[in-house]
Amino acid sequence: EIGALRYQSGKMSASSLLSKVTSGFTSLKGSPPELTKCYLLKFLDSYSYFSFSIIFTLFLSEDFGYSDVTAGSIYGLWGALITVYGLLVGPVVDNFGVAKSLRLGFALSLLARVLIFATTSRYVLLFNVCVTLATGNALGIPVLTTGIRRYTNERSRGFAFGLFYVVMNVAALLSGPVVDALTIWYKGGDGAEEKDVEEAVDDNNDAAQSIPEWSLTSYRAIILSGIVANAIACLITTTVREIKVDSKAPAASPPASLDPSTHSGNMSLDDALGELELEPESGSIREFRPTKGSAMEILRETLATKTFWRFLAVCLITLNVRMIFRHLDATLPKYMMREFGDNVPKGTIYSINPALIIILVPIISAATTTIDPLTMIHFGTYISAASVFFLVASTSVWATICFVSVLSVGEAIWSPRLYDYTMQMCKEGREGTYMALSSAPLFLAKLPVGFMSGYLLQKYCPEEGERHSKMMWLIIGLTTAVSPILLSLCWGYIAKRDGDEEDYLELKINKNTSETKGFLRSPSEFVADSNEVGGLGRRRAAVFASSRSSTNSLNSIT
């Protein structure tokens, strides 16, 4: 009987989960065409980005003769400059709006990729990697996230961000097999290129700044596929409109027109009700006009907000765990080739990550949509940080597969909710500045991580000689574990919600709840209060039932 009950319970849970996933897709019905375009742009941009980032350090070493340390440093510099330019163009994005920023960003990315593909000059390569491509990335990647917020309502936004993350990983999944196909089976130009690099390029010789002969190597062929995707994206951006979906929640009190003391009584009931803003089911679409302002005004306004500083603290604390994905690009491919041979299916192993994300994110997003994003971030970062220690325990293909798999499970739990958390904290019309300022700390981490990757490879996993790869991964694992531990230690500060911030304003429903003082409460407390205040209380209960301090909520997802 107990077994039968467990079976029935599992069946009901699966049915409920499927219903939540279906309901998530249903909530997107009625969204403007721009939402679909945003997903399509994300797919094309992500394919161009991932296919390039997987082979970037290999491309620098094989086609341009850079050492591990130099290639890793250039990779880190590229990522760091995306952050720096993002900080500089944040106010520009707020003034330009989503549509114009996307057009400019994708046009710059296309120009940079074409020149990187065609050049044999180190100067041209470095200029386009560090200036043109980085600027294009800074204008494109964060703006798409802002677009998801603009094109959805409050009811559908959580699922929309989860789907946004899935689309990105579908592109990453495609990039892995393409990289394997073009690096294992296609050998065009490799032999001649290797000879030219050996003869003409010395990494320590400043005079040797160009490759004498261009050829369509495996890595250039991969870059060419990214150019095609980028060109299609440029065409799509020309059709994006500057709009937003109206997603205002019902007012906490009726408008003045419904108060008999505020009008003469000549107003009809229909006219009065017309002034009452009701939350639309799918969201009414209207033109969005960017909030204008000088860069200094926008920065001053943002920095004066208490919520921003709590948000920035979360961004700083999660830096280390976010950097593990840079090692996935810059460190793991060279590690696999040196430990397991040139024909190791590095792209396919890399693709385990997006494959699991595609499967897990819609399920987890639908099942945990009422759980506060910060709770999910806290829980998921522990899993992601633990994944590295598989490579500390064993140097094998299976350990590598376990590392990527467990990392992906953790990522599916926390990374999509970081988007959600970011947009919750942003003031509308200031998303570009919020995202730029919150990304600023990445500048302090990306460049050292790129250098660290090259240094660790050269010291513990050289191309020739004795290797101590387990020590390399132990160092990476210990630095990654700092993030979840700090989240736990700083939980009392980052969990607090300031009462003067509109997005997190909590009404004091009765005397029994006044002692909460803006901290997130447990779902049971809020649901109990909501029974006394009707529909408004129930809506707020649905939002705050996601309390990250709730043990019951964590148990429900584990």
Image (cartoon, grey):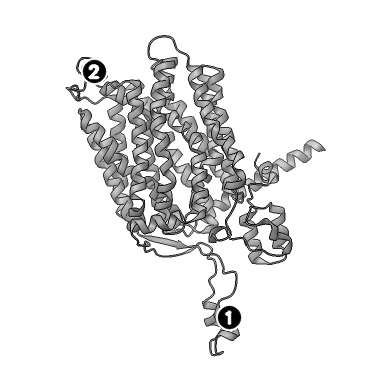
Q: Which residue is mark 1?
A: 258
Nearer-the-camera pick, 155 or 312: 312
| Element at label 2 | loop
Q: Is residue 461 visible?
A: no
Structural crowding at the residue carrying mark 1, measured as other residues with C-alpha within 10 Å and reported as few (<14), some (14–19) or many (≥20): some
In the image, residue 204 above or below residue 321: above
Query: Residue 313, image x and y in percent?
Result: 51, 44
In the picture, measured across the screen, residue 170 lies left or right of residue 97, that is right
Nearer-the-camera pick, 140 or 302: 302
Query: Residue 429, image x and y in percent?
Result: 41, 59
Residue type of the residue flagged with mark 2 = Asp
Q: Which residue is mark 2?
A: 202
Residue drawn at x 32%, y 30% as measured from the top left: 74
| Element at label 1 | helix
Nearer-the-camera pick, 96 or 114: 96
Q: Quadrant of residue 542?
A: bottom right
Q: Earlier in the sequence, mark 1 or mark 2?
A: 2
In the image, residue 317 above or below residue 139: above
Q: Quadrant of residue 117?
A: top left
Inter-mark Cα distance, 1 to 2: 79 Å
Q: Residue furthest top?
A: 465
Structural crowding at the residue carrying mark 2, measured as other residues with C-alpha within 10 Å and reported as few (<14), some (14–19) or many (≥20): some
Numbered mark located on residue 451 in the image: none
In the picture, measured across the screen, residue 484 lies left or right of residue 80, that is right
In the picture, measured across the screen, residue 184 lies left or right of residue 269, that is left
Residue type of the residue flagged with mark 1 = Leu
Q: Quadrant of the C terminus?
A: top right
Residue drawn at x 27%, y 21% as measured from the top left: 65
Residue drawn at x 40%, y 9% as measured from the top left: 465
Query: Residue 315, image x and y in percent?
Result: 49, 43
